[in-house]
Amino acid sequence: MIESILKRYPKERRFLLAILQDIQRTYNYLPRKALNEVREYLDIPLSSLYSMATFYRALSLKPKGKYVIRVCDGTACHIRGSMNLLEEIKRELSLLPGEITPDGKFSLETVNCLGSCAIAPVMMINERVYGNLKPDMLKEIFSSLGG
Amino acid sequence: MVEDNMPDKKTVLICCGTGCLANNSYEIYRELKKRVEAAGEDISVKPVLKTTGCNGLCEKGPVITILPEDIFYCKVKISDVDEIFEKTLLKGEIIERLLYLDIKTGKKVKSHKESEFFKRQKKIALRNIGQIDPANIEDYIQREGYRALKKALFEMSPDEIINEVEKSGLRGRGGAGFPTGYKWKQAKKINSFPKYVICNGDEGDPGAFMDRSVMEGDPHSIIEGMIIGAYAVGAQKGFVYIRDEYALAVKNVSRAIKDAYGRGFLGENILGSGFNLDIEIVRGGGAFVCGESTALMASIEGRVGEPRVKYIRSTEKGLWGQPTVLNNVETWANVPVIVDRGAKWFSSIGTEKSKGTKIFSLVGKVNNTGLIEVPMGVTLREIIFDIGGGIPGGKKFKAVQTGGPSGGCIPESLLDLPVDFDSLDKAGSMMGSGGMIVMDESTCMVEVARYYLKFLSEESCGKCTPCREGIRRMLEILEDICAGKGREEDIELLLELAETVREASLCGLGKTAPNPVLTTIKYFKDEYLAHIKEKRCPAGVCKELTSYRINQELCKRCGVCAKKCPAGAIFSKPKSPYVIDNNKCIVCGACREACRFNAIEVMGRREG
């Protein structure tokens, strides 16, 4: 699978970020094995790959959940109560930002701004955007996903 | 080009911007389409259904517009589709219930153009958004799209184009306001090839989403601007750097680039002019600092997005050490209009030193949240109270935050400030990318400063010490103040640190990072003092310094607060008002928001 990702790109350093993003999308994280193959393909030291992986938020070295919950903590969401959403998630799923549920189903992170400020507070679960949220709406959303 | 050219044919425009999509606008489109198709021969004029980019009035979404009558419906639900089809599309009847209620006049209006929200706007960069299907290049061409490109390629020399842009007074819309024409001139002057053009679509300021809307709703306007710019400076390669979180923007810009190649607007020998240009997309990696030009270029090169010192400008040595013109999405979208209508027309709009219009995302505690475009020089008061319709729930205005994390908070006393690059700077804030976050009495300004520094400390790339360490120390002090551990000398210390961070940081992120702290201390010092001396958060936000009490006289015993309380901390005995158990209360504020009688009072730190 990694090979098919690499094949899409010429052997040039400038495609490194795009390659890592594709791997992230496929595996939900950057497996060590995949990084080794990228290192060989582009002839870049593993340390550089590590610095990319830790610098860019879109990349992670640890697996993420089947459903990635992204609670927006942009300014508009913040002043409209995004912190209360996080507390509700903590109560409902026992999940803190950066964590994953033991069954691997949900992982939680905060993002700086999803650009949907007009319907704040907002969260995204995978690609779907949920707007104008109130803490008491979360339970139903999670249980519809089997949480 | 800016005026609407109404199609004669019956057309239904369904907003599929992010705000409306989250409220099922695409399902509405599908349902309506089903109805129209099922009707078949029964309707004499078959309406055309289009999904468009963001209309701006996200608060009232999903919104749909029916042309040529120009009927504007808002908050449409899937269950309304049948009625819209039967009544409005077949019989031309208006459904009163779905019309927009103008808060200012208290009247329902048929066309969005009659509302205060739209009436005061002037759309240049947003000229097509909401009117066209962004996935259809024909829609763009029909509204005079790519006409400016033809004019530039066949009637103007590169120098003439640069002159025109310079004379128009266009300044960078990404925030810093650098004169665009001058930037191009510098890049043109240097005799070193290849040269590059870049569109900065790494919109990262929390509270700003205008670039997202332009990329999603009118991608060709950016591409046309970039082709003109590339031709003017002699570049043959362009990059559009788009934030990773903006999946729809990536999709729509990709499609637009493909279609532009198909029509000969990109590629080799563009329209037979002999000029070549290739444009490709680079997806960002979710790092705020990559919105900084040199960090962005590092990121395109496949490296970690750290900025560099700018002794030498990017126009001389930018991407891969070559001359590079980097402009923001909104700036590029303005270019075709300037070339098409001329510098004189463009510079007649705006103020002496800030020409044209600016898009703002008006969000936070304001009635009409959404995206607006206004001539430079309108006042903050007009934006917030006339266009924005004021503060919801009868609450009192406290401040408006402009310029993202690098900007500042502007108090009520400065609301009559004309909005342009220079006057916002003078107030200690900045134009920034155009996020405008309205705050009311229930927003704590110390906590807002803490919030921004938290953001900046996470996004600081760590390369230079003043930014990396300075912001963190300031954040620690603010966290202490919010937690009730503030000391009187903290304010002095914050000011001193702010000075160092501002003077000694490498790039714009650090240089402007102290602004949120400086402006809140300058305009809202009393709130800092309340936290430090009285151990009380006047807005009732900082949990350590807040407790709630139910005013026994105002309480009407409706019980809404008790129902909303997630901690089960509110209870009542028969026939007496509700009370809060402070030991159980988690200070989330749900009761305060729910109470319609303002019976929940904010008190200081809880006893014991």
Image: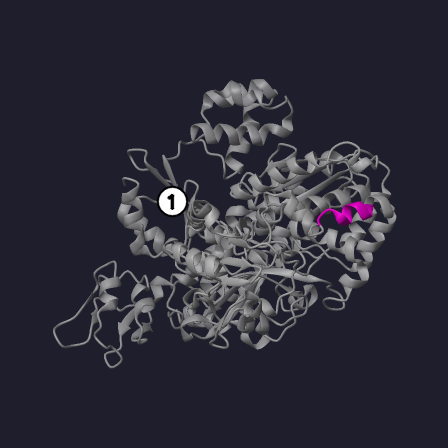
| Residue type beneath disc 1 | Pro
The residue under label 1 is: A97
Examine the rendered structure and indicate whether residue B594 appears above or below residue A57: below
In the depicted view, which residue is nearer to us: B357 or B100?
Answer: B100
In the depicted view, which residue is nearer to us: B356 or A68?
Answer: B356
Chain of the residue under the numbered disc 1 shown in the image: A
Principal SS element in the magenta part? helix
In the depicted view, which residue is nearer to us: B37 or B149?
Answer: B37
Examine the rendered structure and indicate whether residue B423 appears above or below residue A26: below
Quarter where residue A18 is shown: top right
Is the C terminus of chain B in the top left, top right, bottom left or bottom right quadrant? bottom left
Q: Which residues are magenta?
A: B145-152
Residue B472, visible in the rendered structure: no
Counting from the top left corner in percent of width and height, residue B145 is at: 71, 49
Counting from the top left corner in percent of width and height, residue B278 is at: 72, 34
Residue B66, visible in the rendered structure: yes
Q: Is residue A46 left or right of residue B392?
A: right
